[in-house]
Amino acid sequence: MKRVFVVYATDNVGTAVLEAIQTGDHVGCNGERSDLEVIALDPIAYGHKIALMDIAQGDTVLKYGLSIGSASRDIKEGEHVHDHNVESNRGRGDLAERETVTAE
Amino acid sequence: MSEFLGYIRPNGDVGIRNHLLILSGTVYANGVCDRVADTIHGAVPITHANGRCQVAPDLRVTRRFLAGTAMNPNVGAVVIIDHFKEEGMTAEDLADDIAPTGKPIATVNIRGDGGFISAVDKATRYAQDFARQISLHQREAAPMSKILFGTECGTSDTTSGLASNPANGLAGEILIAQGGRMLMAECTEWMGCETWLTDKATSPAVAEAILAGVQHMEARALASGEDIRGSQPTGDNMAGGLTTIEEKSMGAVKKIGDSPIIEYLEIAEAPIKTDPGNYVMYGPGMGAESISSMAAAGCQVLTFCTGGGHTSNHPIMPTIKVTGNRGSFELMRDTVDVDVSGVFYGEITLAEAGQIVYDEVERVCNGYLTKSEALRDNNSFAIHRVGPSI
């Protein structure tokens, strides 16, 4: 079984730092969450992240036990997690404007 | 409370090294400084490109860097050399700044003392006397609470935020539990995790200063025509798997642990407070300037977390390189001190990695040479500029 690394117990993503992952690989976790095992739905390159559980659109993506952004669409357990399905909560001038309009 | 063996200075500070510093007051005295240091046992030269034709706010920062470095507890004595009458920062001005530490100081002026040869002669004799004088200093027991532990990260990669930085944060927590202080600069890397930092601030003033520091650095970058926000994470960060600025910044700031933030400092400014905890400082991501600002603030020791394997080493502040990348450790075995990559392979836990980093810091505080110190690769003294040369 291949392995990813999970920094904090509350994380919903793991990082491929031991080896690259191929679609269909059974993936276990080093670090935290040694109880979890997922099947990769995508190839995960070195340094990239895999979803350890389903993450609904709008939910927080957690790494280091902290938010690294929000899911921009539903993410399935085992999917590659990157800029195609996660967006930053920083530098969002469009959101700030919308909030201002709502507040008014 | 554990203790270490250090050099107790007249003002109560405790050094982990006992350097004789040959300090250049201006670029035009660098040659004399190097010549003197070549002659004298154990002398460390610090040379740089500043000291002339700087606007006042910029010169004030340069003066803090130079005086602060000489005031660092790792310096036992200092010879300062300048070349003529430097405006706003003579060798005597620097000596006045350093004097409250009570350490031996001598000044030499190249023109005043009759040219290069006479200045080398005079400065070398001072340096010889000081070298012998400080050789009498003995290490004595001091509490770990006397340590101001600086931390930096550079040439980071995927492993940095996962292993070396969080392990380093845990090492800081071990020191802080014994009454010590940890210092982090590089406010460019606070972007995206301001809330994580301000939540740790011990007062609203500290929280506001943290936010203002990040905004100020962003504004300076924007004024140069560069939008660092749009370029973060960088293209190679994205290719390497980093998705958002939060992810990148969190990985970086994890090099301090979860302790409260006691004080916000301007660049190269020494803390006033002594409470155990984290301290943060305004400054650039540029490694040499950043670690030099922390040495000027009084850090006796620094960990430099690196993914790729960094060569950075400060001339008077031992710089311990820590990596979570086994390949980098193998490749840079003569330069990188600590390998915590075992966390990825299930060989050690993150908590154990934190203890490994802390143990190395404590050993270095007791006199153990870092790899770069043994090589005398003193490459990382640099002064941050906040104004143009005129």
Image (tube, coloured by chain):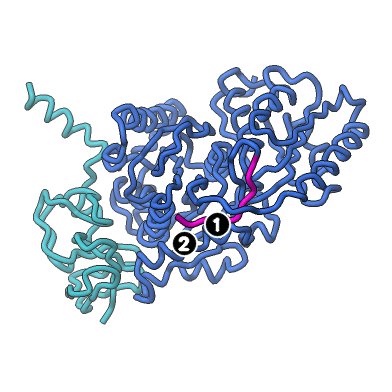
The tint chain A carries is cyan
Q: Is residue B154 left or right of residue B211?
A: right
Give the foreground label among 2 and 1.
Answer: 2
The residue lying at 37 percent from left, 33 percent from top is B214
The residue lying at 36 percent from left, 41 percent from top is B190
Q: Which mark is residue B6?
A: none
Q: Is residue A42 visible?
A: yes
Contact check, label 2 and label 1, Cβ < 8 Å:
yes
Image quadrant containing the C terminus of chain B: top right
Q: Is residue B182 magenta?
A: no
Q: Report which residue position mark 2 lands on.
A: B357
**Image coords of residue B304 (percent x, y):** 51, 53
Amino acid type for the residue under numbered disc 2? Val
What span is in magenta?
B1-9
The tint chain B carries is blue
**Image coords of residue B148 (percent x, y):** 50, 45
N-terminal label among 2 and 1: 1
Q: Is residue B234 left or right of residue A69?
A: right
The residue lying at 45 percent from left, 45 percent from top is B181
Image quadrant containing the N terminus of chain B: bottom left
Q: Report which residue position mark 1 lands on.
A: B320
Q: Quarter-wise, where is residue B71 in the image? A: top right
Secondary structure of the magenta portion, mostly? Answer: strand
Q: Is residue B225 left or right of residue B132?
A: left
Q: Quarter-wise, where is residue B53 in the image? A: top right
Q: Residue furthest bottom?
A: A1
